[in-house]
Image (cartoon, rainbow, N blue to C red):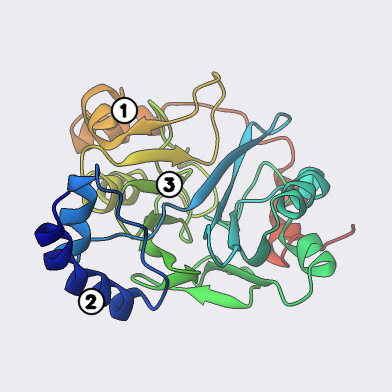
Amino acid sequence: MSAALLHRLKPAVSVASRVWSCKPPRIEPSSAAASVRLYSGLMEPRAPLFRQLFESESSTYTYLLADADSREAVLIDPVLETVDRDLQLINDLGLTLKVALNTHCHADHITGTGLLKKKVFGLKSAISKHSGAAADIQLSEGDRISFGKHCLTVRETPGHTDGCVTYVSEDERMAFTGDALLIRGCGRTDFQQGSPQRLYESVHKKIFTLPGHCFIYPAHDYKGQTVSTVDEEKKFNPRLTKTLQEFVNIMNNLNLPKPKKIDISVPANLVCGLHDI
């Protein structure tokens, strides 16, 4: 790189330092593209650390996200039986768990949130204010949960239950949809205030309006699938590609047995998973 070009780039380093209040990245002579991004002020913070974890009995996914610099972390849909596993990973990675989030009041497992609060000093719990469940943070549409430089935005997606929410990353590249939208499926609507009409509207207005490349991370999968995208589900989901009336007919005729643990899980989850443990 010529001396003249290096001279022109010097003001860009100063601007970046003021914007981000941190040491700017080193500009390598061969990295012209990086130089242009830095000069134009488009430098972005590092992507969050991300882990997808699985609990086999209820086929539940738990998600860990953390800021790579501050090490602040959030945990989505923790399960009681895997609390120690999750804490071990959090400790191994040198993270500080700030908030445990639930996408809704689960019927098939007991949340690990309450036990986590007993084990992690200062940990906050969060769930939709429409769930009827106890939590430190009662969430509404548009609320944001921050961890370091990153945040998740709440989109209310009722239908499976009244208190279902979807958590969307700030760049709209990831959506944690709970039971509202599963991979090639959706949560049932025949208990816990379920409504097929509301679920259909929630998915089409709050999830299918995200960018097509946005990754879909559900609360469950029973076939070994781990991730989908908005475009995939809009094209291939066998239920939600139907008309509203067709969807309602499908959901009203599933004739599924009730979850085995519903009579234990729901009362426990209404009190943050601390009932009789």
Residue 54 shows up from this direction: yes
Provide the secondary structure element on which disc 3 rests: strand
Quadrant position of residue 154:
bottom left
Mark 2 vs 1, N-terminal side: 2
Mark 3 vs 1, N-terminal side: 3
User: Image point 61% across, 51% down: which residue?
Assistant: 77
For the residue marked with disc 2, what is the amino acid? Val
Q: Are marks 3 and 1 in contact (CB under 8 Å)?
A: no
Q: Give coordinates of residue 196: x percent, y percent.
A: 35, 43
Q: Are marks 2 and 3 in contact (CB under 8 Å)?
A: no
User: Image point 81% across, 43% down: which residue?
Assistant: 81
Say which residue label 2 marks. Answer: 15
Say which residue label 3 marks. Answer: 177
Q: Give coordinates of residue 194: x percent, y percent.
A: 45, 49
From the viewer's perspective, is 106 left or right of 195?
Answer: right
Q: Residues within 10 Å of mark 2 (few under 14, many from 20)?
A: some
Gap between marks 2 and 1, in whole Å?
50 Å
Q: Residues within 10 Å of mark 3 (few under 14, many from 20)?
A: many
Provide the secondary structure element on which disc 2 rests: helix
Q: Give coordinates of residue 90: x percent, y percent.
A: 71, 53
Say which residue label 1 marks. Answer: 239
